[in-house]
Every structure is written in C-alpha cells, then in structure tokens.
Image (cartoon, grey):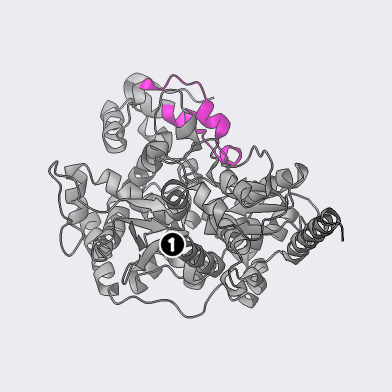
Amino acid sequence: MNITRLDKARDLTFKRQVEEESGQNLSACYQCGKCTAGCPSAQVYDRQVSQIMRAVQMGLKEEALKNRSLWLCLSCSTCSSRCPNNIDVAAVMETLRNMARREGWVQDRPIETFWKSFLDTVKYTGRSYELGVMAGFMARTLRGWGNVEIAPTALMKNKMPFIPSVIHGREEVARIFQRYADKEDRS
Amino acid sequence: MKYAYYPGCSGHGSSVEYEVSTRAVCNALGMDIVEIEDWNCCGSTPAHSVSHELSGALAARNLMQAAKTGADCVISPCPSCSSNLKMALWRMQKPAFKADVDALLDAPTPANEQGGADLLETYSVLQAIVENVGIDQVASRVAYPLEGIKVVTYYGCLLSRPAHVAKFDDPNNPVSLDNILKALGAEVLPFALKTECCGAAMGIPDVNIPGTLSGRILETAKAVGAEAVVTACPLCHMNLDLRQRQAARITKNRPFELPVFYYTQLLALAFGLPENTMRFDKLAVNPKPLLDKIAERRDARVMAAYNEARKAAGV
C-alpha cells in the first residue's frame, strides 16, 4: 500500500492547470467509476481512469502523469459520453498526455515512437504513408513483428502502396512542424 | 449545396474501396463534390496526442485550402479526419487557441466577429447523406435490394463522439447506418458493441490490443447471427477485415469468415452502380458467398413474382 502525505505532495496549481488546458471542471467528478467501467483499455491500464481523475483532483501530479495508461488510451471518448456530470474525461486524459510529454515523463516509448514515425511521414511528404510508418517504427524499436502476419494480404491486395503520395505544399507542412519544434525548444 | 471533399490518406492506400465507392455514391445521389486541392494529412491521433496546436495547424491548412473551392462545407469519408477537422474549428473558436495555431502557419486563419477562426464546417460523408440528402432519397434510388441479409452496423468511436463536437446521431446508440441499411433492404440486427472501440492504430505497437477488442466485436457479431459487418471507418475496417484472422487467433476463436463492408460499397451495390465502383476484390475476407446468396435470393424472388403474375393473368 502506498501512503501519500497530502500536505507534502499536494500541488493545486497542477489541478488548475489541467482544468484550464482541458476546459473541464474536475471538482464535478464524484468518483462513480462509470468512465472506468466503460473503458475498453481498462484491462491493460496500470492506473484506472477514475483513479487518474482523483489524482488530479488531489493535485498529485506525479501520480496523474507517470503512468502507462495515458499512452494506452485509445481516445475513443466512451468515458466522456458516459460521465453523469458531463466531464469530457477523454479531453482530460489527452491534456495529461500532452503535459507528461512536456515534462519528459513518457511511460510507453513504443507508442510514443509509433506516433513520431507517423508524424515524420507527414512532415516529409505532407501525407501519412503507411509503409513508411511501419518501416520507421520497426527500425527504431525492433518491434511490431506481429504486423508481418498481415503484410502478405495487404501487399497482395495492393493496400499498402510502395510509393508515398507527396503534396506540392509539403514544405509548407514541414514549416508547421519546424515552428512547433522551435516553440517546444523554447519552453 | 457544394461540398469540399477531403479523402484522407488511407483513401490512397488501405481503403481504396471506400474512396472509390464513396465518390460513386455521392455522384449517384447528386451531391456536388470537389476535392480540396493539395490537401495534407490531418495528423490523425498521433498529432492530437502530441499537441492540440500541431493538430489544429495541420487541420487549419486543409480548411484554408477548402475555402478556395467556394464550397459550403467540408465532407470526409474518414471519421478520424472529419473528427479532427471538426475539433480544430471548435477549439479555434477560442481566440487564444486560434493565435497559437496561427503562429504555426504561414498565414493566419481568417477571424470572425468573436475573434474565433472563420473557416468551413466539416461533416462526415455519412452525416451529409443522412441529414442533407435524406434516407427517403437513398431508398428511392435502390434498384437491387439486399434481400434481407442479416447485418450488424459498427460505427466505431468517432462518428458521434465526443458528442459536443460531433453533433451527430446518438453517442452511445447511433442509428444512422442502421437506417441506411434498412432502406437498402438488409435486416439490421440489434448489436450492443456498435460503438465499442476496435483498438484503433494500437496494432502497430501491439497487435494484441486490436486483436482482443476487434475479436470480441466479431465474436459478438457472429453470436447474434450476423452474416456481415458494415462499417464507415477505414481504421475499424482494417482491424475487423485485414486483421480478422489475427483477431480470431488472439481471442482463441476459429476463423470468423465474416465479411466486413464499407456502407458505401453496399449503397453502390443496391443502387446498381458499375462493379468497379465497389471494389469487393479489395476485401481480405471473401464476400463472394454472401454476394452470391443475395443474387440467388433475388432470382428466386423475381421468378416467384413472375410466376405469380402469369397465374394472375391466367397463362
């Protein structure tokens, strides 16, 4: 059992920051657990979504941000649609995910690397490119072999073109990524 | 009504059949669509999971390109794309967020009187068909009904969620696809997992996630007696069709052999459009036995009606 001394660990500016960024009133959560009950990823979470909501309410920053659940969240918004107090729980989870990245507290590297591989193809061509995403992900992590199983059908049905679709405005898109990276570096 | 059309990246790769059939159906329904010139990827889940501003900027470039078409609104067949474009405009109604997005773009987005972004609204093609064209219009176009084949409709997460942004159908029990399929002459079975997540793109890092979730969806569809699953999302389709064998193995089931269609393929079929607008050859699970069954039932029905007419005429 973990014992947390709230007088020491509590960070209420963190709670306010989450409320502001997500646009949600976290005090409205009365811990009914409907979000957790409907969550399709609950079985693989190390912290349930209702526990994360409680941690934010209490201002327990590390508890809320250092968990794999934020990365395993499928962004399906089932939690939001079932919350009896109309909290957009998925928006809170996403805010926390964005914050955890900024703090350098990514708890699931492969998923983060998959997103990076995806965004890289967009940065270079202007569009996402399925084969490029796979290749980038596998080269970086040496994982993803489970997907080899579907490759023959995908290739035979010509569902994964070898040649990426490159747009004229790709440099314009690359500049969006560059400005975003510059902004990240500054903060 | 003129629509700026945003195909989405998968339309050029894994969901060619969705792209081709969507265009054919829109044309058949008299929808005036023009593709957005030089559109870019909306960033999908990876972009909004990393940063809302980055996701907003990728969407905003598309919405600015869309404005050049002179259309009334944007439509996209892909729920993830339409959700991202909707969400970006919704968030950009806050002037502070709009400013953050503008800072990432070559040129700022136009502003409305309240200081929010003044860009076109986005809808899914499904929403445009249901709300603008109407089910009656769809029904009147049916030349070859689906002869009562038993289907379950699978919506996935994003068509009607989050409700305050999607503003379409019911977030927990949507019925728009059901109504379309009924109009086409299919029997739509009650299905509890209509909006249960299929596992989305998590298959790339870990095949067990979509394997488990999609396996349960297919298992339930089979258990209620479905002969096919009908969906409107390229990613759901990939998990349910291309990964179907994998899902069966992971959930310790025998192969489901359950065909998974895009609703637009079945619209094209029922409208009697040319075969190359359906691209059934692209599906991983062979739909031919079911398509043959539809054709057989039709022949039997037509034959029976013919004999009935002959009898009535006293021949």
Q: Nearer the viewer, residue A179 or B254?
A: B254
Q: Specify whether residue B50 is in view.
A: no
Is residue A50 magenta-colored?
yes
To which quarter of the image does residue B248 belong? bottom right
Q: Nearer the viewer, residue B249 or B237?
A: B237
Is residue A33 magenta-colored?
yes
Left or right of residue B198, residue B137 in this image: left
Q: Position of residue B301 (x, y in %)?
A: 79, 56
Number of callouts: 1
Figure check: B36 above or below A96: below
Left or right of residue B210, residue B28 in this image: left
Q: Position of residue A63 (x, y in %)?
A: 42, 33
Left or right of residue A115, residue B180 in this image: right
Q: Residue furthest bottom?
A: A163
Figure check: B73 above or below B168: below
As helix, strand or loop, the secondary structure at mark 1 comes to: loop
Task: Name the residue type under label 1.
Answer: Gly
To which quarter of the image does residue A70 belong? top left
Figure check: B203 above or below A148: above
Q: Which residues are magenta?
A: A28-53
Q: Specify whether residue B295 is in view.
A: yes
**Residue at (27%, 73%) from the top-left corner?**
A169
Q: Which residue is mark 1?
A: B30
Q: Chain of mark 1?
A: B
Q: Position of residue A149 (x, y in %)?
A: 67, 67
Quarter the N terminus of chain A occupies = top right
Q: Residue furthest front?
A: B314
**Residue at (55%, 53%) from the top-left corner?**
B140
Q: Position of residue B226 (x, y in %)?
A: 73, 48
Q: Nearer the viewer, residue A57 or B312?
A: B312
